[in-house]
Amino acid sequence: MKVPIYMDNHATTPVDPRVFEAMRPYFCEIYGNAASRNHSFGWQAADAVEKARKQVAELIGAAPKEIIFTSGATESDNLALKGVQAKHIITVVTEHKAVLDSCRRLGNVTYLPVRRDGLIDPDQLREAITDDTGLISVMYAHNEIGVVQDLRRIGAIARERGVLLHSDAAQAVGKIAIDVQRDNIDLLSISGHKIYGPKGVGALYARSRDPRVRLEAQMDGGGHERGMRSGTLNVAGIVGLGEACAIARREMAEESARLAGLRDLLKDRILAGLDGVSINGSMQRRLPNNLNLSFAGVEGEALLMGLNDVAVSSGSACTSATMEPSYVLKALGLVDDLAHSSIRFGLGRFNTREEVEYVAGRVIEVVKKLRELSPLYDLAR
Ligand SMILES: *Cc1c(COP(=O)(O)O)cnc(C)c1O
């Protein structure tokens, strides 16, 4: 076993070697511009892009022409939220910053709260819809707490009221089965580097009929991607995204079962070895590879520093340099102390059982040590 151990797969994932091999020819050999219509270099690049478009579409139950390639889920979220030009948008307080910051720029937005378990109340969504509501945006699976919203139910409400539904599915694609038809999803954001593909490539699914989604492009230029996203296509990256989707489609069921087993092992070991540990977010509706825990009496940052041979992330680090506690954990109703004491574990394709056992042991060891040093924990008890 090699250290450091990477267990931060919600932040990014390594490129799968099979994905890398699929991409390799598209740098120095098949380097044509997919928009070059006059020669075989261009045709080969365009063929590779169309194959990838089909691979992405198949993973989510879409048609290839409904896939727009972008630079990642951030761009896909921006294109969806700004491109629809809705008079009123409904979203959720725990969304990713790519959605929240896009909404902030747009103005007329209703932010739904979440329950203690991180899930929204569908009745509150229904009540928030007005005659002006043009778009609902609800993340499929959460990047911090891993909770999986009931998109099927949310989609039924959106469809019944004739409102478009967007979902940021950067964490859900390739981990759980997604079907945009079943869920009545009209727009869906995908990121390459969360699914063992390369960074800097992603896709937006935009429904082409019943109803056809109309988007105002956010980038002017050569009219690539049916005018939705101008700019020379990142052929190698797109090939990588396509291959990552094809692998996920074949292996997702087995891999998710394996990761859920490892995640539960990690949880059970830590809970058996320590008291004062709480789980953030629903355990029933959760990604198979996510665990988010709070350790009473321990600073998440101190725990991260103690775990110097394990790559995980804390509920305060990623938000800003000012060490604000995570807005997501605060939205669940956690007090600042518990939000600051949280750690996110993100398991991935290349984690082993041996690594999970090691990480559980290290967490128990470091938390015990920090609590011995901390008078606060004893006082609280
Ligand atoms: C990573 C992530 C993004 C951003 O994706 P990029 O491809 O890095 O731009 C957006 N939303 C969620 C839920 C994510 O996990």
Image (cartoon, helix red, strand yellow):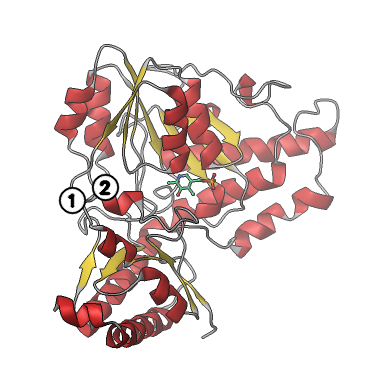
Q: In the orientation shown, which residue stands out farthest toward the top? A: 131
Tell me what residue is drawn at x 53 percent, y 82 percent. Answer: 3
Q: Nearer the viewer, residue 199 or 240?
A: 199
Above/below status of 51 relative to 349 = above
Residue drawn 47% across the image and 27% down it: 105
Residue 147 makes an appearance in the image: no
- Can you tell which quarter of the image residue 119 is in? top left
Report the number of numbered marks: 2
> Label 2 is placed on what type of residue?
Ala
Indicate whether 354 appears above or below 161: below
Disc 2: which residue? 331
Q: Position of residue 113 (x, y in %)?
A: 23, 39
Q: Is residue 161 left or right of residue 86?
A: left
Residue name at image x 32 percent, y 81 percent:
367
| Element marked by disc 2 | helix
Q: Is 269 on the left-hand or right-hand side of 177?
A: left
Q: Look at mark 1 in the image and give the residue it sits on.
A: 116
The spot of residue 300 in percent (x, y) is 37, 69
Closer to the camera in the image, 210 or 153: 153
Q: Closest to the observer: 53 or 337?
A: 337
The kind of residue on which mark 1 rests is Arg
Look at discs 2 and 1 and give the one toward the viewer: 2
**Label 1 CB sits under 8 Å from any ligand 1 atom:** no
Residue 304 in which image quadrant = bottom left
Q: What label sits on residue 247 in the rendered view?
A: none
Assess disc 2: are there few (<14), some (14-19) or many (≥20) residues with their C-alpha within 10 Å of its C-alpha.
some
Secondary structure, mark 1, is loop
